[in-house]
Amino acid sequence: MTRVAAIDCGTNSIRLLVADVPVEGPHTDLLRRMEVVRLGQGVDATGRLAPEAIERTRLVLAEYAAQARELGAERVRMVATSASRDAANREDFEAMVSATLGQLPDVVTGTEEAELSFLGATASLAAAAQAHGSAAPRPPYLVVDIGGGSTEFVLGDAGGVRAARSVDVGCVRLTERHLRSDPPPPDEVQAAEADVRAALELVAAEVPVGETATLVGLAGSVTTVAALALGLPAYDPVAIHGSRIPVGAVRSVTAGLLTATRARRAASPVMHPGRVDVIGAGALVLRVIMDAFDLDEVVVSEHDILDGIALRLGRP
């Protein structure tokens, strides 16, 4: 058993998982945290990480580093994804992380990001299905991780990854680029959808999506859509993990989010405050994926790249 600390720093949020990882079988969570720091604020327009965004990230990272030490983590890995990968001043971000965490972040490629997401998402699918009293999802799995700056697609099965592609459509990027009104009018929504559809052509050219038996959706946009589709009175990760949401419900939730005012979205009991501004775009990405690739349901996973980082760290 190895105690590890995994940190995932994306465009919108930074998350921590401290877990005990056995040689085989499921890992045991000791601590999970998520804070919205919006590291990717404005990066699509400026190409640079804003100093205030780096500072917001530093404050939370300092707390995570302290908690990892207190819990006795033997190995620590911080993975940084789309926003820092794209930024011209990523050296400023890396210097901050080195000073705060005592080591550099791994600014991973989109392909490695997809592989880690696949590992984290698929390791617990059978157990989640059993908990819901349903049959285990069938491979091949198309794992889709909708982030703030990019979305990762990876197709694979028990033998591992067959194909992967990362494209630059995420909930923060699309919101900043297109969905500027409250609520966005049809022309803004159509422009955002056109961006997603163009990106999906790139995905389909490299990933044989027609082989998909099960769509597995990850990250906060997907889990929030699931919570809304399930009509939960409060965000419940146990109810969400392993749930199956039909495409009709995804379409309905997405339409509701894109026509709601910010105040109405914020009033939802399942909505994290940091997702209020970007959830419409995230839901739109999921809906367009399901429509474009003719997928009739999504299996929702609360486990994602963070769990993949922990598993790979504990079983090098």
Image (spheres, grey):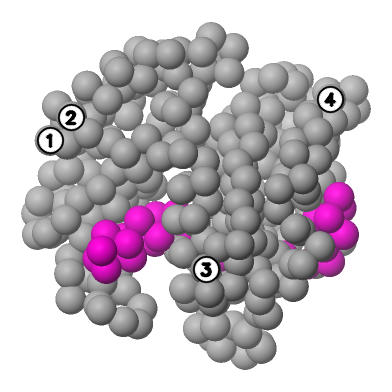
Density class for disc 4 (Cα within 10 Å; few <14, some 14-19, many ≥20) is: some
Q: Earlier in the sequence, mark 4 or mark 1?
A: 1
- The reply to whether the C-beta atoms of the residues labelled 3 and 2 are less than 8 Å apart is no
Considering depth in this image, is 46 or 209 the residue closer to the camera?
Answer: 209
Precedes in sequence: disc 3 or disc 2: 2
The quadrant in which residue 300 appears is bottom right
Q: Which residue is mark 1?
A: 102
Quarter-wise, where is residue 18 in the image? Answer: bottom left
Q: Is residue 107 above or below residue 45?
A: below
Q: Earlier in the sequence, mark 2 or mark 4?
A: 2
State the image coordinates of residue 222 (x, y, percent, origin top left). Answer: 63, 53
Residue position for label 4:
191
**Residue 231 x, y percent position in the rendering:** 70, 64
Q: Nearer the viewer, mark 2 or mark 4?
A: 2
Identify the residue shown where x is 76% and y is 58%.
209
Label 3 amino acid? Gly
Around disc 2, counting alpha carbons within 10 Å, would you say few (fewer than 14), some (14 to 19), or many (20 or more)?
few
- The amino acid on which the numbered mark 2 sits, given as a three-letter code, is Ser
Q: CB of mark 2 within 8 Å of CB of mark 1?
A: yes
Q: Which residue is mark 2?
A: 98
In the image as oriented, which residue stretches furthest toward the top?
A: 46
The crowd level at tag 1 (other Cα within 10 Å; few <14, some 14-19, many 20+) is: few
Residue 283 in sight from this viewpoint: no
